Structures are given as C-alpha cells and as structure tokens.
C-alpha cells in the first residue's frame, strides 16, 4: 500500500507540473502598449498592455493562458530600469527599480521549482551595475496581484550580452545560459541550473567562435537538442545540445562574422517547429536592405543552404526580433525610424511599419512557400519596436528515457550535504576530476557515483592521507550523477557531478 501511494504521489506531482506549463506562453506583451493573446491559435488577437519598451520584455500566463505578469526594461535610462506589471496592466507592488538596462535580451522569467505562485525574474545590467541579478515575484501576495518580494540579488559581475533558458531533461528544473561581453571574442557560454534547492553555478563552457560584438542572440529548437547563435557581425553557428548535462557540442559555423564595415547586422534567429529550417533577420545600421534569410537544415550538417527570402531598402524601418508563437508561426517585429532616432515614438508617429508585425505563416516550407507576409498582423492600434518577448518554452517536457528524466531521485536531492567536500573541480568534466576535502581520514573512504535512478555506477577508494585527491570514472557515460563520499560508518558528503564525453 505504501508503494502505491508513492506512485500516486509522483503521478500527481508530474501532472500538476505539466498542467502548469500548458499555456504559459499564450500571452505576449511587448513594444508600446502592444500584446497578443493566443487563446485561439487559429485566430490570435491583439491586446493592450502597459508595456513601454523598445526591446527587452518577458511575460508569463497560467495553465489556462491567463496573463499572470510581465516585465520590461526602459531604454536610454542608466541603472535600475526594469519594471514589473501585474495582469491588470498596473505596476506591481515593489515592481520598480529592478536591475536592468534597456537593450534587447536581458530578461527571463523562470518558475520557482515546486511552486505555482512564485517566479524568478533574471535581469542583466551591462551599464552601471554590471552583472546578473534575480528578483522573486510572489503571486500569493497583494490579493493575487503579486509583489516583488525579493529584489536585485546579485549572482555575478559578468558583463552579459544575452540571456536565455531551457528546461532540464527532467522536465522540471531549468538551465539558464548567457554569453558575455567581458572580453571581445569571448567564446564561453556561462550557465546556471535552477533546482528546488536554488540556483547553482555551472562551470562555463568554451566552445565555438568568439563573438567580436556584444549584440548576440541564441535560441533552442522546439526539441531542445540544438542551439543557434547569431551576432550583429554576421556570425551564425549551430550546436548540438544535451538537456541532461547542459553541454553544447559539435559547433558548426554556417556563416563567418565580418570584422570590417559594413557588417551584415544580423539581429535575430528562430527555428521552425520541426527544426528543419532556421530563420535569421538582418537589420542594417546604415543604408542597406532589411532581410529575412531562410537556412535549410534538412541535410544538416552535410549540406546547409541559405536563401534570402525577403529584402527591402532601409530608410523607413528596420527589422528586429523573430519569435515562434504557440501557433508555430514565426512573428517578425520591426520599428519605424526617423533620422536614426525613434524611442520613444512621437504621439503622431503611427504607420503600417510600427502598427503591425510580419508573419512567416508556414515556416516548415521551403523558399517562398514559407509565406512571409510583412506588416500582416495588426496590433489593434498599438505599436511595436524591435523587441518581442524573450520567453522560453514553458511547455517543454522531459526527455523520456534520458538518464535525467527521473524526478524521484532527481536533482532536488543533490548538493544538499557537501559535508567534508570543500570543492569538486572541474565540473562538468569527462569523468576525471579532483576532490578537495576539509580533512584527512584514518579509515577507508570511498567515492561512489550513482545515477539519478539510484543505481551505483562506479566506486573508487580515496587516498585518505591528502586533502586533494584525484578521481577517475572513465567508463561512465555522459550524464548527471550523484557523488557520495562514504566511510564504513557514515555518509561524508554528497555533490552533483556532470560528466561529458
């Protein structure tokens, strides 16, 4: 009977978690008072919001697609520019003076694990208060309207260019990724793992081509097993991605970056629902053409075909973000410009360019059959700039059959008792790493490696006379594991280990 209740408990847990995510991305808020409600996927409707942003914006809805809250940064204002709005389009209680700067990809909302009413708002400031921050939004407060209950907790002091997130392979936890502008040509992806215990820093991964510009965007495909990155200097790169370990691999450069003027000015990217096609927008910083580029990945990586689907001369407007909607169409933002300055729009500045989004209606069709229609989605009299919501895929489920798809012994139980372990490095690793301990021992001590299902995978007797000891688990396949340090009489510590091959 006890075993039956355990099974029922986990079924209810998984059902509750999955149901929370069913329509969490069905409401977008962006631009100048603009928004879209996707409750009817066949007929999305424009809505009015309190948004006032040319770029960075995020929003999240509940199980039924009802808006919960949204946030944006304000351009041209140094310092703490992020603001949070409740679902009634009012400033949320304590929802001002949050770290952030008004560019384009500096915000992301992630649920606090095992809570349907609390959320992390990650924000980036790359101006005065450089670094990554998080604030906590608690919808239990203020009669359900919510309140920012914790604000501006600094995580690092990196000069971050872009941030995004994706669900862990267990379908519950979250990976937070970022690229930095700490140094030009930085090729590192910086990572954090959000679990029920909190926010864990993961060792950054150097991979791919270092970006020569701070203007970067990266996105995952719908399956979550591939990532695309573009930058303003024309770089397009693709990587394989393991949602279990959080590791990128097999970088493929589709297009090299250009280090002399004029640069290609690539702005944004988005995968079609199948992942067979990647779309890239180009938005020139000097007289040139705005472009929509389709990249055919059906024979990837053996043959990658690029085709410019749409091109129009610069002066009146410039293209911005691409984002796949819940209806699997790709929406294209654009901004009307006058002498290079358009924020904020003048009260009289309303036209077809800033009152509509473009739409790629059939992104999984080759060439012109993808049916890109510029300025075809009317925003109900509201206006857009360059940004669209930087919302991750809240609906992404677990990778069934992965070593990480078990929640019963999942990551929630890891890192809670380091014990005598001072440090484990490097992590991630290839199965070879070091343990730095707080003490030596007179008795035998073993390092034991367990899968997330609780299976013992490897065991090694430690050199118990030194504070630092080498561990080698070369035969263990890639994945996330639990390392337990044991003596004959006690458990001396537990840590998460990410092994890559």
Image (cartoon, rainbow, N blue to C red):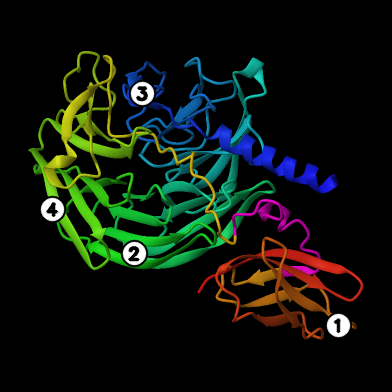
- Tag 4 secondary structure: loop
- Residue at which label 3 appears: 36
Q: Any magenta on residue 66? A: no
Q: Main secondary structure of the magenta part?
A: loop
Magenta stretch in the rendered image: 404-422
Closer to the chain start, of discs 4 and 1, is 4
Closer to the chain start, of discs 1 and 2, is 2
Identify the residue shown where x is 89% and y is 76%: 488
Closer to the chain start, of discs 4 and 3, is 3
Circle 4 Cα neighbour tier, 10 Å, few/some/many (<14 / 14–19 / ≥20): few
Vertical arrangement, residue 434 with respect to residue 132, above or below: below
Query: From this viewpoint, is residue 258 visible?
Result: no
Give the percent coordinates (x, y) of residue 41: 36, 26
Give me the C-alpha separation between circle 4 and circle 1: 65 Å
Closer to the chain start, of discs 1 and 3, is 3
Give me the C-alpha separation between circle 2 and circle 4: 19 Å
Identify the residue shown where x is 66% and y is 35%: 115
Circle 2 Cα neighbour tier, 10 Å, few/some/many (<14 / 14–19 / ≥20): some
């Amino acid at each position: 009977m006890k075993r039956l209740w355990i099974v029922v408990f986990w079924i209810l847990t998984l059902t509750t978690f999955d149901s929370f995510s069913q329509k969490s991305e069905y409401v977008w808020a962006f631009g100048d008072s603009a928004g879209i409600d996707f409750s009817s996927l066949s007929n999305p409707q424009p809505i009015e919001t309190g948004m006032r942003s040319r770029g960075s914006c995020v929003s999240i809805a509940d199980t039924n697609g009802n808006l919960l809250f949204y946030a944006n940064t304000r351009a041209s204002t140094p310092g703490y520019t992020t603001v949070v709005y409740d679902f009634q389009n009012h400033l949320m209680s304590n929802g001002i003076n949050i770290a952030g700067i008004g560019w384009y990809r500096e915000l992301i909302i992630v649920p606090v694990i095992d809570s349907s009413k609390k959320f992390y708002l990650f924000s980036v400031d790359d101006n005065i208060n450089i670094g990554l921050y998080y604030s906590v939004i608690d919808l239990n407060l203020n009669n359900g309207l919510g309140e920012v209950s914790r604000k501006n907790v600094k995580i690092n002091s990196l000069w971050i260019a872009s941030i995004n997130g994706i669900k862990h392979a267990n379908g519950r936890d979250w990976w937070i990724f970022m690229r930095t502008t700490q140094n030009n040509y930085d090729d590192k992806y910086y990572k954090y793992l959000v679990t029920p215990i909190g926010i864990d820093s993961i060792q950054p991964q150097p991979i791919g081509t270092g970006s020569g510009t701070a203007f970067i965007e990266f996105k995952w495909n719908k399956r979550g097993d591939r990532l695309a990155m573009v930058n303003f200097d024309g770089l397009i790169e693709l990587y394989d991605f393991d949602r279990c370990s959080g590791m990128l691999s097999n970088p493929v450069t589709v297009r090299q970056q250009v280090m002399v003027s004029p640069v290609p000015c690539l702005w944004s990217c988005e995968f079609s629902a199948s992942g067979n096609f990647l779309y890239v927008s180009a938005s020139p910083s000097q007289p040139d053409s705005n472009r929509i580029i389709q990249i055919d990945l059906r024979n990837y990586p053996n043959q990658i075909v690029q085709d410019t689907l749409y091109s129009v001369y610069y002066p009146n407007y410039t293209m911005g973000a691409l984002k796949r909607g819940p209806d699997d169409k790709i929406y294209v933002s654009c901004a009307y410009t006058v002498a290079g300055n358009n924020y904020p729009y003048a009260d009289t500045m309303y036209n077809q360019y800033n009152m509509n989004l473009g739409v790629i209606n059939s992104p999984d069709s080759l060439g012109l059959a993808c049916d890109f229609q510029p300025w075809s989605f009317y925003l109900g009299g509201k206006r857009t700039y360059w940004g669209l919501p930087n919302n991750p895929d809240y609906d992404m489920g677990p990778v069934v059959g992965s070593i990480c798809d078990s929640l019963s012994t999942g990551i929630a139980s890891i890192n809670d008792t380091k014990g005598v372990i001072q440090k484990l490095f490097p992590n991630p690793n290839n199965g070879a790493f070091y343990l730095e301990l707080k003490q030596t021992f007179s008795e035998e001590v073993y390092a034991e490696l367990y899968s997330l299902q609780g299976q013992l995978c490897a065991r090694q007797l430690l050199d118990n006379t030194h504070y630092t000891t080498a561990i080698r688990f070369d035969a263990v396949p890639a994945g996330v594991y639990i390392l337990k340090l044991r003596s004959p009489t006690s458990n001396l510590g537990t840590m998460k280990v990410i092994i890559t091959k």
